[in-house]
Amino acid sequence: MEQSNTAQRTDADRVGSERDQEEAVRRALEAYYRAGEPPWDTGVTPPELVALVEGHGAPPPGRALELGCGTGTNAVYLARHGWEVVAVDLIDRAVEQARAKAAAAGTAVRLLCGDATRLDDLDVPGPFDLFFDLSCYCGIPPHRRDAYAAGLTHRAAPGARLLMFGYGPEAFDDPISGVTADELRARFAGWDLVDTTPGTNPVPTFWFGLRRRPDSMRKGGTP
């Protein structure tokens, strides 16, 4: 009985710690938007996304899902280039600004307030041909990262691309933030990491390109 009680306390402590981590992330993001200074939201579409969408070998426009869309700069860019775009952000203030930006641009973007690691709670059916993540994943607590990867994988068309910008673990003081190429290889089953390019930031950053294997099938046999 004592062992059972100890295990229950351990599980409760773990769950409490995980909830604290998630809430700390939310509070930090909300604080950035209240101050009007989210460092990842420059209002300029990064050249890495432009190169993917407009460069040599660019895929034809299809369906795109942006994770952590902020104020909608890149969702609007994708819509202007023919993509059918759904964009998700955890912070309602950011989503409100994104909706205003999309309306001003005359673009049809579905903007949803929600958790990128809980896509099943949102109306976000696949398949998608492109996923874009500008420093969303690298700030997600580790215990939610498998759910993030599973959510994308379940919604990925064969051959779908994921373009992700992330900070390296060395960029943060806390032990839960940051992302590495090895971690992405481990978490994204059925995907190939096809490109890793260092960023130009003063702290370690990277652009990661992943592609869903064409012969990989989502659960239930649907490609």
Image (tube, rainbow, N blue to C red):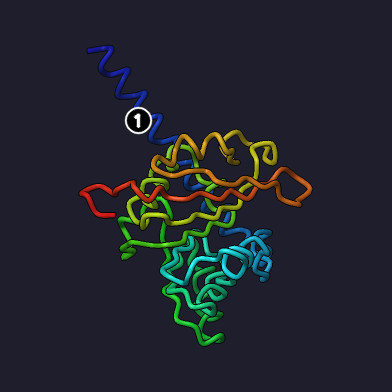
Q: Nearer the viewer, residue 159 or 137?
A: 159
**Residue at position x 47%, y 72% in the image:** 61
Residue 142: % across, % down: 48, 38
Q: Nearer the viewer, residue 20 or 64?
A: 64
Name, please, the residue furthest toward the top. Answer: 2
Instruction: Please determine whether, in this image, residue 216 is positioned above or below residue 67.
Output: above
Looking at numbered disc 1 in the image, what kind of residue is underneath it?
A: Ala
Q: Quick one: SS at disc 1?
A: helix
> In the displayed structure, would residue 59 be above or below residue 219?
below
Please name the residue shown 37% across and 51% down the image.
214
Question: Is 188 on the left-hand or right-hand side of 28?
Answer: left
Seen in the picture, residue 47 relative to 141 is either above or below; the reply is below
Q: Residue furthest front?
A: 57
Instruction: Pinpoint residue 217: horizontal percent, then vertical percent.
Output: 29, 48
Give me the residue at 57% from left, 68% from top. 53
Percent position of residue 82, x then y: 49, 78
List the residue tagged with mark 1.
12
Mark 1 surroundings within 10 Å by alpha-carbon count, few (fewer than 14), some (14 through 19), many (20 or more): few
- All told, the count of numbered labels is 1
User: Which quadrant would the C terminus be assigned to in this image?
Assistant: bottom left
Comparing 172 with 84, the one in front is 84
